Amino acid sequence: MFTRARAVITRTAAITAAIGAVALFGAACQASAEVAPGAYTSTTLSAGSVLLQRVGHVEGRDLVLIGRYPIHPTPTGGYVDFFPGHRVVMNSDGHGGYSGPAYLGPFVVGAFTLTPLG
């Protein structure tokens, strides 16, 4: 009886996690806004410390920093996967910049900002 209850709980938790991931990452791609092209200062923060800050560019649908990364449009801006499991979200701040959480897998590990230059 306990084994069956554990199986039901485990299955329910897995389904809930999958639905949450789709709601967070998948559904956001249905509507489309774009991150405006131009030069930006890119800043990655974690635990209040700057991990990386550099000048970057948005060219077309790519974020160009250390490499060239496709921007996936969302209703509020976009997101970039720098490598598998590391995603940053860029929500428009209404003043030409973008900011959002930085994820490592399902965990928020910091923040990411794009501040326009000039």
Image (cartoon, rainbow, N blue to C red):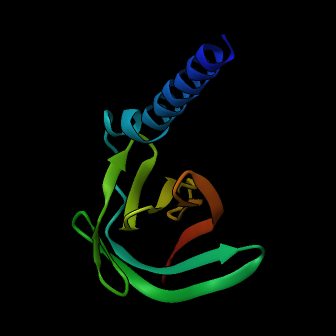
Residue beneath the point at 54% across and 33% down? 17
Q: Position of residue 72 (x, y in %)?
A: 31, 53
Give me the residue at 50% from left, 63% from top: 96
> Relative to 32, does residue 77 appear above or below in the rendering?
below
In the image, 98: left or right of 33? Answer: right
Q: Residue at x 51, y 79 (%)?
A: 42
Front-lying residue, 37 or 104: 104
| Residue 18 location (% of width, % of height) | 46, 32
Q: Residue furthest toward the right?
A: 48
Residue closest to the far top:
1
Image-based side of 71 in relation to 102, left or right: left
Name the residue: 52% across, 65% down.
97
- In which quadrant of the rendered view does residue 52 lie? bottom right
Task: From this view, report whether residue 53 is shown above or below residue 27.
Answer: below
For this view, does 32 lie left or right of residue 87? left
Spot occupied by residue 71 in the image (x, y as percentages of width and height)? 31, 60
3 in relation to 37, above or below: above
Q: Residue placed farthest to the left in the image?
A: 60
**So how many labels did they put on this image?**
0
Between 93 and 26, the residue placed more toward the observer is: 26
| Side of 106 relative to 30 (left or right) | right
Q: Quadrant of the N terminus?
A: top right
